[in-house]
Image (cartoon, grey):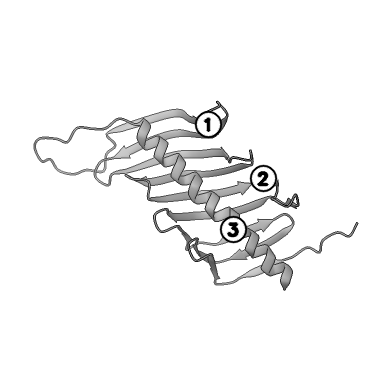
Amino acid sequence: MNRLRHWFDQLTLYLPVLLMGLLAMATYWLVRSTPVTDTPKSAAPVQHQPDYFLRQFTVRTFDPVGRLKSEVTGGEAHHFPDTDTLEIDQFFIRSFNQDGNLTTATARQAISNSNASEVKLLGQARVERSAIRDKSGKEQPALTFKSEFLHAFLDTERVTSDQPVELTRGPDRFTANSMDYDNKERVMLLTGRVRGQLVPAKTP
């Protein structure tokens, strides 16, 4: 039971925070890098048609000494003025924190609102943090978070999914029918059919 509690403590401390940071960084730079359209002088029927698009693009950010901080790529991105959303196909981002630890996120499609406060990952959504060493020098195994749908609310620091989710940490694995994570309260709610598999640690 203590090991299970420790497992969730580590998960809630690292993975959802990294997820929200990745999505915020990705959509912020994409919105900043795309052109601003002029407001039409006369009203016209609103249609769900893109007013600009990007194809086979990559956006990179660097720290002050020139080291890569993040890289966002997409097969195609469209901006829809009627909903003021940015839709990105074949979404991929990799990001390095101050310690050089790598986190990646992928999805078939990402949808962001105009100020990147709300982001949806659709289709084979996957967020993975590589294995790291914590401040005490202890190795922490890789963390992976998978679902067909992830919904991040960046202002309120929540990540939800109404579809099956899978959480893994090293060889340990948990699944549930849905999830609601509140980063401010450090509370993760797994609902529906929750299952867990804990692999005993190997003795030296």
Q: As drawn, is 62 to the left or to the right of 168?
A: left
Q: Residue 33 in the image: x percent, y percent? A: 37, 31
Residue 170 at least partly seen: yes
**Residue at the (69%, 65%) spot, across then down:** 6
Q: Nearer the viewer, residue 114 or 17?
A: 17
The mark nearer the N terminus, 1 or 2, is 1
Q: In front of the other: label 3 or label 2? A: 3
Residue 146 at least partly seen: no
Q: Amino acid at mark 1?
A: Asp
Give the residue at mark 3: 13
Real-space CA distance between mark 1 and mark 3, rounded to the nearest whole angstrom: 24 Å
Give the residue at mark 1: 63
Real-space CA distance between mark 1 and mark 2, rounded to the nearest whole angstrom: 20 Å
Q: Nearer the viewer, residue 134 or 193?
A: 134
Q: Amino acid at mark 2?
A: Ser
Residue at the outermost left position:
42
Give the residue at mark 2: 130
The mark nearer the N terminus, 1 or 3, is 3
Mark 1 element type: loop
Q: In front of the other: label 1 or label 3? A: 1
Few, some or many C-alpha atoms within 10 Å of disc 2 (few <14, some 14-19, many ≥20)?
Answer: few
**Residue at the (38%, 30%) spot, across then down:** 54
Mark 2 element type: loop
**Image quadrant where residue 147 sits:** bottom right
Location of the N terminus by quadrant is bottom right
The mark nearer the N terminus, 3 or 2, is 3
Q: As drawn, is 81 to the left or to the right of 1?
A: left
Q: Amino acid at mark 3?
A: Leu
> Would you say the residues marked 3 and 2 are in contact, meaning their CB atoms lie under 8 Å apart?
no
